[in-house]
Image (tube, helix red, strand yellow):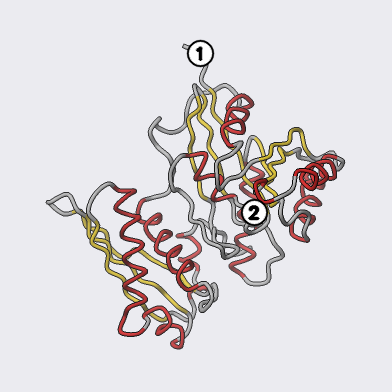
Amino acid sequence: MSETRCGFVALLGAPNAGKSTLMNQMVGTKVSIVSPKVQTTRSRVLGIAMVDEAQIIFVDTPGIFTPKRRLERAMVAAAWTGAGDADRIALLIDSAKGLDEDTRSILDKLSESGRKAILVLNKVDLVKRETLLGLADQLNQTGLFTDVFMVSAQTGDGVADLLKFFSGILPPGPWLYPEDEVSDMPMRLLASEITREKVFLQLHQELPYSIAVETESWQDRDDGSVRIDQVIYVQRESQKPIVLGKQGRQVKAIGAASRTELEHILERRVHLFLHVKVREDWLERRSHYSDMGLDFDV
C-alpha cells in the first residue's frame, strides 16, 4: 500500500469568485452554500476530498473584501486565519472580472505575508483565450504564484487536474477524517445554511444580508424520517412580510426548496417547519458568532 498523505488547502478569493462552487465540485457533494449574492459564505467550511491515498481538506473561506460592519470584519478575519493555518493556499480569481479592487487587496496581503499561492483562474468558459492568457501572464509577474490552473467550477472543466495536483503536494501523514466523510460541519448547521441559501436565491432582490437561519430542533422519528424546526431571523418588522409572502406563499416556497435538497443530502424523508421572527440585534449577538465559528471581538 502506498503512503497516505493529508493536508489543508485554503481557498481564498474575492466575493463571488466561485470558491464554494469549486469546493462542492471537488468534494463531489454540497458542503458549502452557493448564491449569486456576494459574501454568502460567512464562516469557515471544511470540505474533504479523497484522491488515491491523499485526503485533501479544503477550507472554503468567506470572500475577502473591505469590511465595514462587525460581521464583515469577522468574516474577513476568518478567511485570513484559514489561510494562515493551511498547508497550501489556492487563490481563486474570477477570470471574467479580472483584477478588481478586492483581488488587488488580497494580492497585497499575500505579498506582505511572504506566502506563495497556487493561482486558480475560474470561469474560463466565459472568457476569450487571449484575455485569459493575458491575465495569467499579468498575475504570474507578481511572483506570488508557484503554479497556475484554469478551471470552470460550474462545468467541472479542469477540476480533476487541479485535484490530482493538490493530492501530490500534500505532506505524508495519516488521514484526519474517516474516508467517507465530506465535511466537519454538523448537520444542524448545514441544514440552516441550506435554508439560508434558498432565502438568498428567492429573495436576493428584496432582502439585504440582515438575515440568519437557526435550526431550533432536530428530531429523528421512528419511521426513519426527521423533523427539523428552523427560525429565519430578520432585523426589522418590515422584512418579515417579505420572507412570508402573500398568504405565506414565499416562506412555503423557501421551505419546499430547502426540504427537497435536505432529503437528497440526508437520503430520507424530511419534515421541515420554518418560522420567521424579528431579532433586531442578531448581528451583535456573541452567541451567533460562536455558532458560525467567527470571532466576535475582531
Using residue 9 as the reference point, say whether residue 53 is left or right of it. left
Q: Position of residue 260 (x, y in %)?
A: 31, 57
Q: What amino acid type is highlighted by mark number 1?
A: Ser
Name the residue located 80 percent from the left edge and 44 percent from the top edge: 130
Residue drawn at 44 percent across, 69 percent down = 199
Q: Nearer the viewer, mark 1 or mark 2?
A: 2
Q: Position of residue 225 (x, y in %)?
A: 19, 53
Residue plotted at (38% across, 66% down): 214
Which residue corresponds to the image point at 52% horizontal and 39% vertical from the top-left? 26
> Crowdedness of circle 2 by 10 Å Cα count: few (<14), some, many (20+)?
many
- Residue 2's disc is 1
Q: Is residue 86 above or below residue 108?
A: above
- The crowding category of the residue bearing disc 1, from other C-alpha atoms within 10 Å (few below 14, some 14 to 19, many at least 20), is few
Which of these two is toward me, 159 or 85?
159
In the displayed structure, 278 sits above or below 159; it is below
Quarter that holds the C terminus: bottom right
Quadrant housing residue 90: top right
Res 141 → quadrant: top right
> Horizontal and vertical percent for residue 197?
46, 62
Instruction: Report how far apart the C-alphas of labels 1 and 2 lie in the structure.
Output: 35 Å
Circle on res. 263: none
What kind of element bears circle 1? loop
Contact, CB < 8 Å: mark 1 with mark 2?
no
Image mark count:
2
Label 2 sits on residue? 17
Mark 2 residue element? loop
Which circle's residue, 1 or 2, is located before the other in the chain? 1
Q: From what the image shows, is residue 248 above or below residue 158?
A: below
